[in-house]
Amino acid sequence: MPRTMTMTVRLSGALSDFVADNVSETGSYENVSEYIRDLIRRDKERTEQEAFDRLKAELTHAFAMPESTYHPLTAAEVITRNKA
């Protein structure tokens, strides 16, 4: 069962005005919770995309290397290298 968390966030000035503009009858969201959930989902997607792009770049680089540069690694060596 998913965990539900209630959070309190204080905003003032320009940030508060910006949220209010987005959460209104003329804004894109019906309430602040909906807006915050959307922001978090987008940030999560961005983070996942960045991780995928890094992996893709590393694999592209690896596959472009001459086969003579490859050397066998154990799973433990790969895990240790990736923790650094």
Image: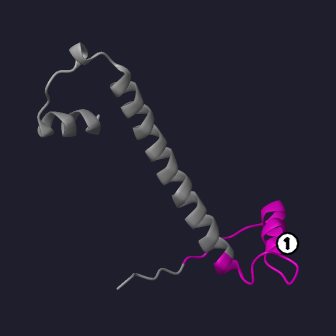
Q: Residue at x 68, y 70 (%)?
A: 10
Measuring from the top left, give residue 51's x and y in whole percent.
45, 45
Measuring from the top left, give residue 18's x and y in whole percent.
82, 66
Q: Amino acid at mark 1?
A: Asp
Q: Is residue 77 above or below residue 32?
A: above
Image quadrant in which the C terminus is located = top left
Q: Is residue 14 magenta?
A: yes
Q: Residue at x 20, y 36 (%)?
A: 78
Per the image, label 1 sits on a secondary structure element best described as: helix
Residue 15, quarter of the rendered image: bottom right
| Furthest-right residue in this view | 26
**How are the colours assigned in the image?**
one colour
Image quadrant in which the N terminus is located = bottom left
15 or 46: which is nearer to us? Answer: 46
78 or 63: which is nearer to us? Answer: 63
4 or 16: which is nearer to us? Answer: 4
Q: Is residue 84 above or below residue 37?
A: above
What residue sits right under mark 1 in the picture?
21
Q: Is residue 1 magenta?
A: no
Q: Residue at x 83, y 76 (%)?
A: 27
Measuring from the top left, give residue 65's x and y in whole percent.
33, 18
Q: Which residues are magenta?
A: 7-34
Residue 14, quarter of the rendered image: bottom right
Query: Is residue 84 toward the left or the right of residue 4 in the image?
Result: left
41 or 19: which is nearer to us? Answer: 41
Number of numbered discs: 1
Query: Is residue 72 toward the left or the right of residue 36 in the image?
Result: left
Query: Is residue 46 toward the left or the right of residue 75 in the image?
Result: right
Q: Is residue 53 above or below residue 21?
A: above
- Crowd class of label 1 (few under 14; some 14 to 19; many from 20; radius 10 Å): some
Q: Residue at x 41, y 30 (%)?
A: 60
